[in-house]
Image: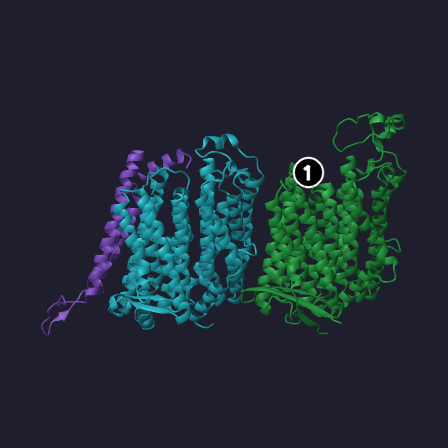
Chain colours: A green, B cyan, C purple
Amino acid sequence: MEAELVNSWIPGAIAFLPLLATIGVFVLGDQRAQIRDGLVVITSAAVVALAAAMYPAISAGHVLVSRIMELAPSLTMIFRVDVFGFYVTLVAAAVWLMVTIYSLGYMEGEHAQTRFYAFFLLTLSGALGSFMASDLFTLFMFFELMSLPAYVLVIHEQTPQAMRAGVKYLFMTIAGSLAFFFGLVAIQGMTGSLDLNQVGKITEAGPLATGAFIAFVIAFGMKAGMVPLHVWLSDAHPVAPSPASALLSGVMLKTGAYGLFRVIYGIYGAEFFRAAGWSTWLQIIAAVTILLGSAVAITQTDLKRRLAYSSIGQMGYILLAMGLMTERAMVGGAYHIFAHAVVKSCLFLSAGSIIRQTGLRDVRDFGGLGYRMPLTMACFTMCALTIAGIPPMNGFVSEWALMQGAFDAGLSGYAVVLMLSALMNAVYYFTIVITAYFGKPRHAEHVGEMHDEHGIIPHVTTEAPPQIIPKRHFQWLREAPPQMLVPMLILATASVIFSLIPNNWPLEMAQQSAKLLLGR
Amino acid sequence: MNHLPVAAVLLPLAAAFCIAFLGAMSRRLARAIAQVAVILDLIVAVLIWRTVSTAGPLAYAVGGWLPPLGIALRIDAAVASFLVLLAMVTGLVVLYAANGGGEDTSPAEGHWFWVMALVALGSMAGVLMAGDLFNLFVMVEITSIVSYGLVSVRRTGAALEASFKYLVLGGVATGMLLLATALVYGITGYLDLPMAGAAMSQALVDYPYAGMAAIGLFTIGYGVKAGLMPFHTWLPDAHSSAPVASSALLSGLVVKVNVFALFKVMLGLWGSSFGGGSPLRGVVLVLSVIAMVAGAGLAWRERDIKRMLAYSTVGHMGYIFAGFAIGSPFAVAGAMYHIVSHALMKSCLFLSAGLWVRQTGSRDVNRITGIGKQMPITTAAFAVAALGMIGFPGTNGFVSKYYIAVGALDGGIPIVAISIIASSLINGMFYLPVVIRAYLGRSRRSEIAAARVPFGRETAPGSLAVVVVLAVLIVLTGLWPGGAMAGFLAASRALLPLP
Amino acid sequence: MVERIFGNLNYLLAMGLFAVGMHTLLTHSNLIKKIIGLNIMETAVFLLIISLGYVRGGMAPIDLQPGQVAVHPLPSALVLTGIVIAVSTTAYALSLVIRIHEQYGTVDADELARIMRGQGQ
């Protein structure tokens, strides 16, 4: 199925617009904060608009190509947007826009805002560029462009914890980049080209081909949070400011999965992959990732750490889809990219909202939160239901497709893994929801009468003794400001609505992507 | 137009002589002559480059005497590109030094820096263009002697001792090179490179031991001057005790020119890289692989920023030697490109580090923390160059490493690709913390106040501009290596025997 | 065998001289003696080159009569240039030694190394 290639300026514009805007952000700086913030929002919105503008051509079956430059023989910077690329780009851009609007509220009064927004935009450029890359060099370049500025986002708070997490992140990112470099060089050596669309050139699983594949798995798996390379994730996502965590979990992890999709299905090819037995390995690793992520999430009491481990588990779903290789599994995996991006970013945004407004991070202290922050918790609850795979939410759609895919492949064991994971997800999400609506804060049980007379006593994660705040000074409703609420609501709605309406656009996109990748 | 090659050598030398005599009278005059001379030399280099790109390789007989009686200068695409690089980097360094750069502003050395930098420029151009073994030897020697001088230009104790060590080791190398040249003349009867090369195959049959001795002596001799492990011992002291402008020239240009000279000799005489098939190639490969990793490892242990940069040079010379030793077109082109990219990166690193040191009065990386807030542009330039050293895509460092790695796989020596990766990782481990702590560390106001320069300003705008230009070039040549890279590839394909 | 040694005596001596020079350079700690060693090494090379160019019964190629053999001028040219280079290097080295002596009061390499280490170099 050879689609028609159409030259277009749009992909290039999408990738470079945020890059140029970064210069504007640095120039405007803290003096002209309002204009700077406006610039950031406008850039994000423009990128979404541009991405959406690609739809007519994509739906007509074309593939949009932007040739930017040729650095040297075989090193080219070309963007090539097919159905899968378009779908992922649009989802990422939309999520990013929501997070941008949220950031305006969240980062109010924070330090180093210019730095934050500048590197925010650089990361955006890198992520979108990765999704649209046509060849390994472009992918490598934008992958790096995304990963390195993300370091600055991770260490934003500059606490000792943050710096430690940052070092871990940086070290693993660089190791991953070098693995990527090795894979890049090996592919060039074996096939003579770095194109991401050259199935069939590698015919035997020799040492170089295998080495290159392992290198790619390391590079992309590390970014996607695959076990055992996930160790940076559980430290980096919690210490980053919540909008950054939302993007790390929501978008950046997906670039890892996306890259691996492209390498497996675009360079090695599905047949070769299956024949070489690597798909089995990937399935096993994915299953371990799912189970480990979900299981450890249960043990975490810090909200953001719990969400981080949950991300690890969820990314395992996508990796499993890659390994199963049946069409329905691929649909499930591709749909999950959308579902998880929307849901996890919303979850992190609500976590940020909770932490900022109440100072609470420990899930055991969330008693009564459902009434103090009704909208935030409503979003949280909707997303939790989605992830746990409750029909008819998005999460259910992807999980169901995955399970069917597992049966299609004759590997029903993985369906069991998925069900176990769904159960564990339910456990650790619903406990939060239940605590929020039906629970009392932990220390209130010890303190007893204090709870009724003096209002709920906030318990922050430091070991300071709980303060008793007289009721007249106490603010019951601590809901977030509208800039933070609206994006969350939009995202939460998106997580529900698409599976309810008959025209489930992301699902359609997912189906077309699966077909594309499998070459049908 | 037809006498340009000689002009490339004579112009800087003439300017140097002028400065040597006039500079004692007026330092300002010396500076002016120096700056004008480098700009003129850049124009000459660009003109040569244009001639070669349009009309093909250039051969020039000095004085009109044709070989074998006369001396020929031979310029192909690669040489022309290097000439431009030479002129550009030397020009930038001279501008940097002329506008207040460097660690301190004491006028101790007077005008001698300009003199030596210009002589170095002329003699290095001579090395690049030499088509005759003895001319090559003379030019290499001039470059070496001037390098010893560049190290000790400020006459600090450490620099004197380092310069002496450099001189001694360099002198031994000189002896070996002269011996090797004599041997080649003895067995072939020619000094002109192509003619000697033509006679070489027969000569090797008649005098196998002399041939082996010659190739070994050339390798060791140039290896010492280029800083190949284990002959690099003079380098860390020399490049770190020299003032940063000298270090930029030494690390960025001098060592490279010596590698290229070795490569030219090998190709011209033995027809392939490192006497194709001889055990020497294997030895050089092993040494360069070790150098890549060990150089980076030794740099990691250093706390003095200039020693760190010097050891890093040793590591990167390993890349270049490896590329040349592998011998496949991609690898050789990559090595040539790495000459260009490392020259730009290392000079940018040294020059921006020089601005830091000038501001803080200290060379210890632990005391340069927080300098990024006060000197964001300088630190940004350092960061760009550091990313280039690690091989971040979008910088020229990536392009050259990529080509060497692909060439390594082509040439069937994957270990080189692996050690490139390992070396890049270690490079990251010592460069990135410097950049991160520069921007995010606590700034040390008290120490900075003690330094001569007032706190709170980016210093020396002229020197800063140079550093920025270098950083920009690093990115530009990383994104548009086109012309130069294609030129190198063509040159390497033309020079090397087909596999 | 003996003829071979005598026939190539110059070359053997040159090699021996080279070794002597290298040995002096490497083992003596006095800086001036190192410079001397360097000079001996370079002289050895000059000897080798001249020996290569020796022609029995040869004359300088100026105003030759028929029947006379000329000596190739090139080796002499090489050696002259080499001498110039050796002289420049020696001059520079000696000036360095003078400055080192001014700074540190010693011309002994080991002593110097000790001082440098002591200074935290």
Q: How crowded is mark 1: few (under 14 residues within 10 Å), some or many (20 or more)?
A: few
Q: In which quarter of the image is the N terminus of chain B?
A: bottom left
Q: Relative to B75, is B361 on the left or the right?
A: right
Query: From where the camera sits, is residue C30 visible?
Result: no
Which is nearer the eye, B387 or A518? B387
Residue at figure coordinates x 83%, y 37% from the top left: A366
Q: Residue furthest left?
A: C65
Q: Position of residue B10 (x, y in %)?
A: 29, 58
Q: Circle 1 sits in a helix, a strand or a loop, which is it?
A: loop
Query: From where the camera sits, is residue B370 visible?
Result: yes
Give the tally of numbered discs.
Answer: 1
Residue at figure coordinates x 68%, y 67% from the top left: A64
Q: Where is residue C106 in the image (x, y as percent from the top left)?
A: 29, 35
Residue A60 versus residue B218 in the image, above or below: below
Residue B80 position by quadrant:
bottom left
Residue A345 versus residue B208 in the image, above or below: above
Q: Relative to A279, is C3 on the left or the right?
A: left
Q: What residue type is labelled 1?
A: Glu
Q: Where is residue B164 in the image (x, y as percent from the top left)?
A: 32, 44
Q: Position of residue A17 (x, y in %)?
A: 64, 55
Residue A132 position by quadrant:
bottom right
Which is nearer the eye, A508 or A263? A508
Q: Relative to A404, is C81 on the left or the right?
A: left
Q: Name the residue under label 1.
A: A110
Residue A447 versus residue A345 in the image, above or below: above
Query: What subunit carries mark 1?
Result: A
